[in-house]
Image (tube, rainbow, N blue to C red):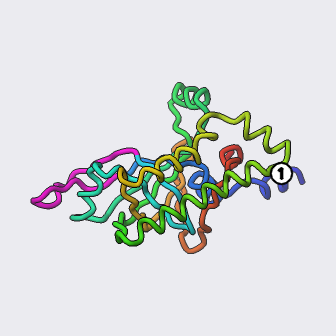
Amino acid sequence: MAMAKAKSTALSAAEKCRNILGASWEAHLNTIKADAKGSKGEVYTSRVHYMVQKGMPYLIVPENDMHNINIIIDERGSLSVSSPVPGRLASLLKSLNKLPPRVAMTGDVLRMKETKVPVIAESLKKAILKEHKAASEATYGVSTVLSSASATCRSRSEGLLSLLNEESSYNILKFEIGSCVFIDSLGSSHNIELDTFEPPKADLLCKFLLN
């Protein structure tokens, strides 16, 4: 009976995938290097910030980042998002030669029409402010957990809001997911069926629900 109950409460790979995407705000974006002569066939990687809105990842990329040039020639890209973990736990995992659970996606990185960028940016700001409001109106028990959480947890929405307020220093790119894989801490891969994959919902407590 206890075993059946444990199985029923365990999160599926898709749920863990959704929680990671909703709880984090940093990712590694890979695109194909390109210049005026075309694609070089090499991969360029950098860390970017992102936010999921209505099931669509929007990437907040510095305007001087090479990704902005690369996707003009080749829109293909991949995105890797690791489960946010406290510093001490991250160090422990590293000492054991293990990586935090992560989500790996492939798809197309698309430029937004200039007229749509302010609209998307404003929508993302509203979503962040909604998180702030929900946290401030939380019960005492939840507020205690949030206030004692790691700096990474507390800084997520503040960091995103700060980036979005610097409109001249970044571009917003849309990442259309083509495939999605959940990779656990042991390195095992679990393919996610996109047809049944529900959009992630940002939740400051998600990182505590991943195991």
* Residue identifier under label 1: 3
Query: Would you say residue 68 sits in the magenta stretch?
Result: no
Foreground residue among 45 and 120: 120
Quarter of the figure that contains the N terminus: bottom right
Report the span colored magenta.
30-47
Q: How crowded is mark 1: few (under 14 residues within 10 Å), some or many (20 or more)?
A: few
In the rendered image, the residue lying farthest to the right is 1
Image point (80%, 45%), residue name: 142
- Residue 172 placement (x, y as % from top left): 40, 60
Image point (57%, 45%), residue name: 158
- Residue 177 placement (x, y as % from top left): 45, 66
Prevailing SS of the magenta stretch? strand
Quarter of the figure that contains the C terminus: top right
Q: In this view, does 114 lie to the left or right of 88?
A: left
Seen in the picture, residue 93 relative to 6 is either above or below; the reply is above
Q: Is residue 132 left or right of residue 138?
A: left
Label 1: which secondary element: helix
**What's the residue type where badge 1 is placed?**
Met
Q: In this view, does 115 lie to the left or right of 165?
A: left
Foreground residue among 46 and 178: 46
Q: In this view, does 19 lie to the left or right of 96?
A: right
Query: Would you say residue 40 sits in the magenta stretch?
Result: yes
